[in-house]
Amino acid sequence: MKNMAANRPDLNLLQVFDTIYREGSLTRAAKTLHLTQPALSHSLARLRAWFNDPLFSRQGNRMVPTPLATRFIESMRPGLNQIHSAVAQFHSFDPTHQRKTFSLALRDILESTFLPQLMAQLAPYPDLGIVSQRVARRDMESQLAAGKLDFAIDVLLPVSEHTGHQWLHQDPLVVLARKDHPWVTMAPTETSDELSTERYLAAYLQAQHVLVSSRATGSGVEDFELSRLGLQRDIRLRCQHYFAACRVVANTELLLTMPASYARLLASHHDLAVMPTPAPLPPVNVHLYWHKAYEQEPALVWFRQKLIRDQP
């Protein structure tokens, strides 16, 4: 690396470096920074000369950082974040006049239940956009810290002290079954006796089930609670998506236990019965996550407050 003391560090170049690293694309970085492609390429050339290192190499359609670039970003970003936060404190955010795209990490189930209402709420602000993406839970905090994500919405997860989070809502569990499934007729009513409730539970445990999980092994949240009650169910199919699971349930005797908000949406598409769980299962608690380094930026403050106040 060339001696940086020869010139004072150029914060604009550091911003270019950080944006290329986050976007993984010169085209997207130029758009984010409101620069022309030649201007961005010129800045990258200056950075490469400054560091005496390629910094980024093209692999397919992505610009991949070199080991030196990765080491530098880890040491540089905390200071750059502090500068951004300090500057942001002196500016306000007006969603009616400013253009901003917010990035969210959402699971499939939350995209279907959360995004329609969110986009309706953002209708008065035509210059505000949303990028929703699926991010592995193990990568969520690092992407929030890197600024690649503004927020994540997910179940309650263990996070570090650098990640802020806020409870949004809870979603009870229900069971989906084919409408002519024998188990559906056994559902207890307000006047049912204890024996009817026990039969309903016994039939649930005797039935075969679909478990939706992104993991190939391990128990679902409902199985942990059943196990705590000394109960166990028979998992016949393990798959990755609730939509596929509902199509299976619509054509088999299998049962599917899932969050109620998405269950009602899918049940209407697949003509399925939505049934109460036969045992008391805890609801799914949904939380909002963000990185504390950015939590004072006016645009993110405005959007975070909106998500908390107006969430479905």
Image (spheres, rainbow, N blue to C red):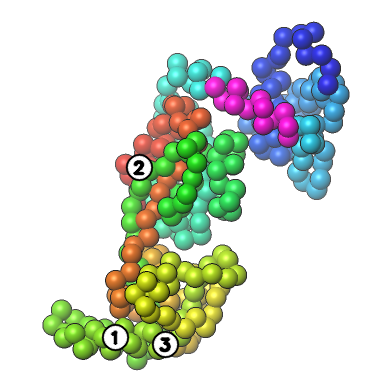
Amino acid type at image mark 3? Ala
Dot 2: few (<14), some (14–19), or many (≥20) neighbours within 10 Å? some
Amino acid type at image mark 1? Tyr
Looking at the picture, does residue 78 appear above or below residue 178? above
Looking at the picture, how far across and down is residue 229, in whole percent?
A: 34, 75
The N terminus: image quadrant: top right
Q: Reply yes or no: does residue 88 show up in magenta.
A: no
Q: In the rendered structure, which disc, 2 or 3, sits on the residue that comes first in sequence?
A: 3
Q: 161 or 186: nearer the eye?
A: 161
**Which element type, helix, strand or loop, lies under badge 2?**
helix
Dot 3: few (<14), some (14–19), or many (≥20) neighbours within 10 Å? some
Q: 125 or 100: nearer the eye?
A: 100
Q: Residue at x 33, y 44 (%)?
A: 310
Q: 276 or 248: nearer the eye?
A: 276
Residue 151 visible in rendering = no
Q: Nearer the viewer, mark 1 or mark 2?
A: 1
**Which of the 4 quarters of the picture holds residue 182?**
bottom left
**Which element type, helix, strand or loop, lies under badge 1?**
helix
Looking at the picture, does residue 88 appear above or below residue 264? above
Looking at the picture, how far across and down is residue 294, in whole percent?
A: 50, 30
Q: In the rendered structure, which disc, 1 or 2, sits on the residue that comes first in sequence?
A: 1
**Which of the 4 quarters of the picture holds residue 5?**
top right
Looking at the picture, how far across and down is residue 181, in whole percent?
A: 37, 89
Residue, disc 3: 207
Looking at the picture, does residue 14 appear above or below residue 185? above
Residue 170 visible in rendering = yes
Amino acid type at image mark 2? Ile
